[in-house]
Amino acid sequence: MLINHYSVFIPISLLDSVDRQFDYILRGCHCSARSLARNMAFEGSMKDRGEVRIHESLDELSTDLADYIAELSEVSVKEHGVFTVALSGGSLINLMRKLCDAPYNKTVDWSKWYIFWADERVVAKTHVDSNYKLAKDHLFSKLPIVPSHVYPINDSLTAEEAASDYKFVIRQLVRIRVINVSNISDCPKFDLILLGMGPDGHVASLFPNHSVLEEKNEWVTFITNSPKPPPERITFTLPVINSAANVVVVATGGGKAEAASMAIDDVGPECLGLPARMVQPGVGKLVWFLDNEAASKLKRFS
Ligand SMILES: *[C@@H]1O[C@H](CO)[C@@H](O)[C@H](O)[C@H]1NC(C)=O
Ligand SMILES: *[C@@H]1O[C@H](CO)[C@@H](O)[C@H](O)[C@H]1NC(C)=O
Ligand SMILES: *[C@@H]1O[C@H](CO)[C@@H](O)[C@H](O)[C@H]1NC(C)=O
Ligand SMILES: *[C@@H]1O[C@H](CO)[C@@H](O)[C@H](O)[C@H]1NC(C)=O
Ligand SMILES: *[C@@H]1O[C@H](CO)[C@@H](O)[C@H](O)[C@H]1NC(C)=O
């Protein structure tokens, strides 16, 4: 694995063999030595685009992702007794699967997790398109999560009503400080928001050129014309995503390479409106988890 820690690039396996003094950054990961050459040319300049972690395989990515989430959970629970996390759907959930295995299934304090959805399809909770169902089937049903700490949308409402209801639910939890408040906005501050990214650069249900990108006042909003089915979704807005303490964007496969470059590289102004590029936490930390294919068009790595 390759970590761009803001301005620091650490080619893991190379250090492993030559320079033991950097062991503390290794975190048990591996990557090829050619990464060093690829990366030395690109030191610096990524501060506002976050940390980029590139993985040789999906297996390595899943392990690193599970590790990272477990670490954030530990820190949050230590700091304020809970871990509030918002999920999306898609391949992200499968890439989180290692959390169900040892050691995480035992070492993570699952009873402190509160689970939300950064976006959800307006379908029944039992529907194959439901992000809730996806996460339940592949994650929660295998972990000791407290059922009352899981917050699916109300699936008997319309998209508009469901968005408004979800905002109300979150507001109640903010009021009793299960969810923190951002000190730079009036928005809830989730401990972690986990996002995938589409080949078109969409994140959550924030699609390119959609008016939903301009929503500044609502925490949760809805769309009824998603370019990708199903058409009706609810979604966190950019202000909420950018108020999180931590945001993780996971993208794998060559189909995401163009969007990853447009979201991360120093590119022209035409990319500024790409939803994935608009993910810019104000005080929180942003980390990209990519595989080699998704990273293949990053200018700073080629
Ligand atoms: C954790 O997952 C492992 C499989 O990786 C399994 O053998 C073990 O029983 C699980 N432990 C708990 C407490 O669920
Ligand atoms: C969902 O909305 C319906 C219709 O307003 C309501 O009857 C029901 O109690 C709600 N369910 C939950 C879990 O809030
Ligand atoms: C909220 O965040 C502040 C710092 O921003 C922290 O001191 C406090 O413990 C947090 N509280 C909760 C309930 O998360
Ligand atoms: C907001 O909180 C962060 C830590 O979470 C801190 O670094 C920053 O200085 C705070 N900003 C303001 C305006 O209080
Ligand atoms: C968004 O709009 C820009 C220019 O307005 C256009 O170049 C781009 O292709 C559009 N993207 C999508 C996904 O429609």
Image (tube, rainbow, N blue to C red):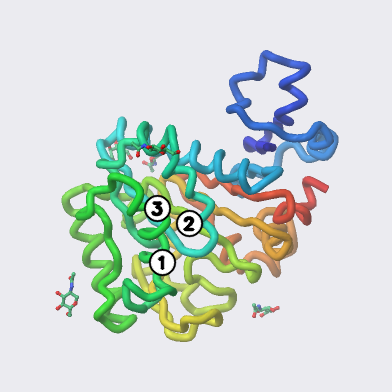
User: Which picture quadrant has residue 263?
Assistant: bottom right
Please tell me which residue lies in front, 243 or 246. Answer: 246
Give the numbered dot on residue 93: 2
Residue marked by disc 3: 139
Q: Amino acid at mark 1?
A: Asn
Marks 3/1: CA distance? 12 Å
Q: In which image quadrant can residue 70 be found?
A: top left
Q: Residue at coordinates 74% horizontally, 22% vertically from top-left?
A: 15
**Vertical placement of residue 228 versus 112, above or below:** below
Q: Which residue is mark 1?
A: 131
Residues marked 1 and 2 touching at CB (< 8 Å) = yes
Residues at discs 3 and 2 in contact (Cβ within 8 Å): yes
Where is residue 255 shown, x and y percent of the image? 71, 65
Image side of residue 166 versus residue 47, left or right: left
x, y percentage for residue 275? Answer: 57, 66
Quadrant of the image containing the N terminus? top right
Give the residue at x 43% y 32%: 103
